[in-house]
């Protein structure tokens, strides 16, 4: 029997499938135990994008020495920051997903929002397959790394590509490579810092107090091979300092989380905190622009280890300013960035477009 297609009244969006936004972050162990932390470290440090050493050389060292030696110590660090709901990174990422979903619904946009971790769970493969099972046929992949690096953004996109290559009918995908100078992102950071200063008082920059902008480190060799990460960190830090009205003497851009014996980009955050304490600098505030959600590197490494280093060296007041997390200004920035990248995938007669979010 022939059916008149005009009588079916099919919604074009239903026929084409739904649109989804997949937020991607680095990852976290399932629990703060040596076993789960060891599993996470093996996956993370086995990625050739992260450790650029031939696997036949690196794997015996990783499995025989690095993981056994680091698992227990790292587990203690995770345990010190673990929240009742779970890992801080996962908890704050889930809150970002919920807040972005609400932001979109307020603009009458039927867009699915999910998240995945490059290492650990939920995996990128699981995230994409979950979307497809929901009827999502178009996915905007948004790594939550403002500054591009091969060891973060590129390896996440690698995993996306591998997942799609194994599918008979993969969804259509768009990718966000970086947003280190996105105005909304810069403004959200400035608001976060200003809000902290409203509560704790502005540092006495004229008296020598300092704002430290601490980014995750990267081996020097990687930058020398052409990775733009270092330059993008510098650009982000300088733009943020300008918005805050700081002079070059008021702030420092530093790098944390060095690993192994090779040279890493500098100055190192730990060294700077120790030096400032030794110089009897009264107060330092530390903010981490490269981390969009608080995690063990920001809460424990900066907020605990960094604090103790500065105070024990002679400093008097130490503040860790929390990351952007699910702050209203940051969620708005992510939403607007998503809208720009969803052009053509959403109906034009939506509140988002009429508000000018996607206006030309």
Image: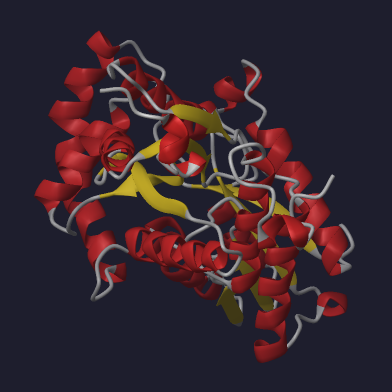
What residue is at 49 percent from the left and 38 percent from the top? 141
Q: Position of residue 320 (x, y in %)?
A: 55, 72
Q: Position of residue 134 (x, y in %)?
A: 30, 45
What residue is at 65 percent from the left and 18 percent from the top? 226
* 19 horizontally vs 59: left or right: right
Between 317 and 96, which is closer to the camera in this rendering? Answer: 96
Q: How is the image coloured?
A: secondary structure
Between 309 and 251, which is closer to the camera in this rendering? Answer: 251
Between 8 and 86, which is closer to the camera in this rendering? Answer: 8
Q: Position of residue 276 (x, y in %)?
A: 66, 65
* 116 horizontally vs 317: left or right: left
Between 108 and 98, which is closer to the camera in this rendering? Answer: 108
* 247 horizontally vs 308: left or right: right
In the picture shown, does residue 167 fall above or below 19? above
When asked about the image quadrant of residue 230, the answer is top right
Q: Position of residue 282 (x, y in %)?
A: 69, 79
In the picture shown, does residue 322 fall above or below 186? below
Q: Is residue 30 visible?
A: yes
Q: Quadrant of the C terminus?
A: top right
* 57 horizontally vs 118: left or right: left
When asked about the image quadrant of residue 244, the answer is bottom right
Q: Is residue 280 visible?
A: no
Q: Quadrant of the N terminus?
A: top left
In the picture shown, does residue 54 fall above or below 274? above
What residue is at 21 percent from the left and 33 percent from the top? 42
Number of labelled discs?
0
* Residue reaching furthest to the front: 1
What residue is at 21 percent from the left and 19 percent from the top? 59
């Amino acid at each position: 029997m022939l059916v008149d297609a005009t009588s079916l009244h099919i919604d074009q969006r239903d026929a084409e499938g739904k649109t989804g936004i997949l937020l991607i972050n680095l990852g976290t162990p399932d629990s703060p135990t040596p076993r789960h932390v060891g599993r996470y470290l093996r996956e993370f440090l086995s990625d050739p994008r992260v450790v650029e050493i031939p696997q036949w050389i690196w794997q015996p060292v990783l499995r025989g020495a690095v993981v056994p030696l680091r698992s227990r110590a790292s587990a203690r660090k995770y345990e010190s920051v673990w929240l009742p709901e779970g890992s801080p990174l996962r908890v704050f990422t889930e809150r970002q997903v919920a807040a972005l979903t609400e932001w979109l619904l307020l603009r009458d946009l039927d867009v699915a929002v999910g998240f995945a971790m490059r290492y650990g769970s939920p995996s990128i493969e699981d995230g994409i397959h979950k979307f497809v099972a929901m009827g999502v046929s178009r996915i905007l992949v948004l790594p939550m790394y403002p500054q591009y690096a091969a060891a973060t953004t590129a390896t996440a996109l690698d995993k996306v590509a591998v997942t799609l290559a194994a599918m008979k009918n993969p969804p259509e995908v768009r990718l966000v490579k970086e947003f280190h100078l996105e105005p909304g992102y810069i403004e959200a950071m400035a608001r976060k810092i200003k809000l902290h200063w409203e509560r704790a008082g502005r540092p006495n920059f004229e008296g020598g107090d300092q704002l430290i902008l601490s980014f995750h480190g990267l081996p020097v060799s990687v930058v020398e091979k052409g990775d733009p990460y270092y330059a993008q960190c510098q650009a982000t830090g300088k733009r943020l300092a300008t918005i805050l009205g700081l002079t070059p003497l008021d702030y420092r851009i530093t790098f944390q989380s060095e690993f192994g014996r090779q040279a890493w980009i500098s100055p190192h955050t730990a060294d700077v905190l120790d030096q400032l304490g030794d110089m009897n600098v009264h107060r330092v505030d530390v903010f981490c622009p490269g981390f969009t959600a608080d995690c063990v590197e920001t809460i424990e490494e900066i907020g605990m280890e960094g604090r103790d280093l500065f105070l024990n060296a002679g400093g008097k007041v130490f503040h860790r300013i929390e990351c952007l997390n699910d702050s209203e200004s940051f969620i708005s920035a992510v939403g607007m960035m998503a809208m720009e990248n969803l052009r053509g995938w959403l109906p034009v007669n939506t509140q988002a477009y009429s508000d000018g979010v996607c206006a030309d």
